[in-house]
Image: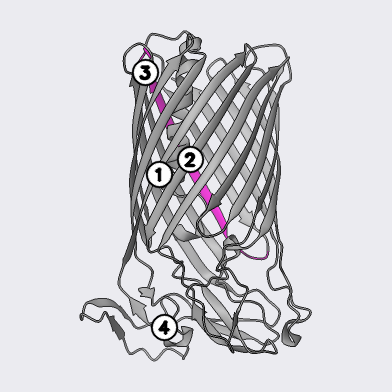
Amino acid sequence: MQLKRSPGALRRGLMAATCSLLAPAAMAQSGAEGEQPWQADAGLLYYKENGGRVQTAEPVVALRKDYGDERVLDLTFSFDSLSGGSPNGAIPSKKAQTFATPSGTSLKAASGVPVTYTTASGQTVATLSKVTLYTVAPGELPLDKNFYDRRLAVDIGWSQPLGANNHVSVGGHLSKELDFLSAGGSASISRDFDSKNTTLGLSVNGEIDSIQPIGGAPVEGSEYTLLEKQGHKSKDVLGAALGLTQVMTRIWVTQINLAYDSSHGYLTDPYKVVSVLDGSGANLGYRFETRPGDRTRESIYFGNKVAIGHTALDLSARHGKDSWGIKSDTVDARWRFNLSDDEGALYLEPHARWYRQSAADFYSLYLDGGSALPAHYSADQRLAAFTGKTLGLKLGVPVGDTSEFSVRLESYQQTPKVTTSALPQLIGLDLNPGLKTVIFQVGWHQQF
């Protein structure tokens, strides 16, 4: 389910394109002009959330071929397998709560009689005969423990010089999930100044997504018990990034990036609901969430790479905001320590990251059943105000002259700003539990 992930294809593309904009100066300084061997990076990422939430295993294989003269081909293949419990948006209650999985047609026991959903024009959306219900115990966060997804993605990129001081790159992305298909492309151009000590670049990205929710997309903002369904949905994203990198000294490189993207179409999560409560906090029912059909995002990024003796510090900060009212700040630091003077030595790399965001304008833990419904609403925890902290450590072990083995272990903790309510029926309940995750990754780098 693509909407359950943070990074989308467009943002990955912008990051890759921006990196390619900033690469020419460093590549030129490497002095490699002839054809180089293939480089392969293989990794396996394991991610697990606490409380029986989502866990995933993701193998990734990346190939790079330098044909000389800065002409480089990049290929990346990845596969995700996700399972576990995914929060459905409803808040905990002092009574048991029952929900249907996305393919459900009602909140009644299965009758075995197929139910056919059609659009207003008569187009068949889905024919479903199986209803799977799940019940959440009092006080627990509603999770759909039937959640699972599979994702296969392929990325390709090519970069090369254009004249003496220019560099261009193009790329494409294709990914397929059980309920989602995404295709995108990117292009960038950069120019070097001041003997390649300064590089200015511009990248653009586009993405088209087909959203095919299991059982059909629910009518946005409709009453949950009706389980009204629609056909497939779509959205498109356009973005651009402007990057400047500057070699400050022989041990210090700095860069600044400005990024902008605009999304249009179906931006609602079809699997999220919002609890509807009365004045005491008693549950009156649920409604499917509804989000605006447009969103723009802007960000500024400032990064520095500094070599200090046998260590290398990578320190960056980012500020972003969007048209939904979310503002965010990020500080990220990686400090690599070589454990000997030899090139390609054993190394340790501690990592620390701090993130903070405000809530979306239409975010709310629940809806007031005694008031008129707002135009848009969502209880998705990713749209709430929270802080996130990451701490980790990576160990790199050289194997011969052309290989490296690495292992990385990190922990992430997300702390929401609002977790309680003064309504009588909600006192004592943790309405928005924090999130803790463990991230473990092994990797192998090989030249051949």
Residue at position x 20%, y 80% in the image? 121
Circle 4 residue:
227
Which kind of residue does numbered mark 2 sit on?
Ala
Q: How much space separates mark 3 and mark 1, taking CA atoms?
A: 22 Å
Give the class, few, some or many, for how many residues have Cα within 10 Å of label 4's Cα (few <14, many ≥20).
Answer: many
Percent coordinates x, y for residue 11 in the rendering: 46, 44
Q: Amino acid at mark 3?
A: Asn
For disc 1, the marked residue is 239
Mark 1 or mark 4, earlier in chain: 4
Q: Is residue 260 above or below residue 374?
A: above
Q: Position of residue 427 (x, y in %)?
A: 77, 81
- Kind of element beneath mark 3: strand
The residue under label 2 is: 259
Q: Quadrant of the C terminus?
A: top left
Query: Which numbered disc, 1 or 4, marks the residue closer to the eye?
Result: 1
If you read the primary sequence from the N terminus, does the residue marked by circle 4 or circle 2 appear first? 4
Q: Which residues are magenta?
A: 51-70
Is 25 one of the magenta-colored residues?
no
Query: Where 270 sits versus 17, above or below?
Result: below
Q: Residue at x 63, y 44 (%)?
A: 440
Quick one: SS at disc 4? loop
